[in-house]
Image (tube, rainbow, N blue to C red):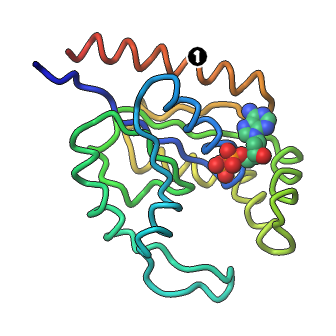
Amino acid sequence: MKIMKRPNILLTGTPGVGKTTLGKELAQRTGLTYINVGDLAQEGQLFDGFDDEYQCPVLDEDRVVDELEDKMGEGGVIVDYHGCDFFPERWFDIVFVLRTDNTSLYNRLEGRGYTGKKLQDNVQCEIFQTIYEEAMEAYKPEIVHQLPSNEPEDLERNLDQISQWIEQWIKDNN
Ligand code: DAT
């Protein structure tokens, strides 16, 4: 039996924009595998030092890439992370940058317990579209797409659109 080729998808954007919510639901609907890079690093202790300013461990990007390489080669993976410039460009067939309005994002992050500088810096990251620019530099601009992620209707639309894109990709590549 010939194994069907399936695409790899990157979901990126500022913390709190809805990557995990979208990624998990998308995996359920499509049968693709969802990988949360933050959780993967936590489980494998893929860290390299500690960030005193933000009081959090620093991701060991090389070890994360090594850890994921085989799985990415097989295809059919949805990767979720709030950064994107250290993954090999060749891994991804499409990149989605989720975007959330400032006030909604502020409320979500506050609800998550973020305060002070951490809260401010993350909202600023979204205002300055830092991750979108990072994605546009790291990948071919034509595979990078922004998706509004403000309300439940956005989630539904994004799920429908990406599911359709996956279906078409599978037809075109098998
Ligand atoms: P991320 O993984 O980007 O950090 P998340 O999926 O954990 O974000 O979502 C953060 C919060 O926002 C969570 O409480 C769920 C909510 N949320 C996600 N997508 C949303 C949407 N389209 N509309 C309203 N709320 C949403």
Give the amino acid at mark 1: Asp
In the rendered image, the vertical position of residue 134 relative to residue 8, given as above or below: below
Residue furthest out toward the left: 1
- Residue 137 at x, y percent in the picture: 44, 49
Which residue is the site of mark 1? 160
- Residue 122 found in image quarter: bottom right
Q: Is residue 173 left or right of residue 1?
A: right
Q: Residue at x 81, y 41 (%)?
A: 101
- Residue 10 found in image quarter: top left
Q: Is residue 134 left or right of residue 127?
A: left
Q: Residue at x 78, y 57 (%)?
A: 123
Q: Is residue 47 left or right of residue 169?
A: right
Image quarter of the C terminus: top left
Q: Residue at x 52, y 29 (%)?
A: 28
- Residue 69 at x, y percent in the picture: 25, 54
Residue 129 visible to an observer of this rendering = no
Number of residue marks = 1
- Residue 46 at x, y percent in the picture: 41, 73
In the rendered image, the vertical position of residue 162 relative to residue 38, given as above or below: above
Image quarter of the N terminus: top left
Mark 1 CB in 8 Å range of ligand 1? no
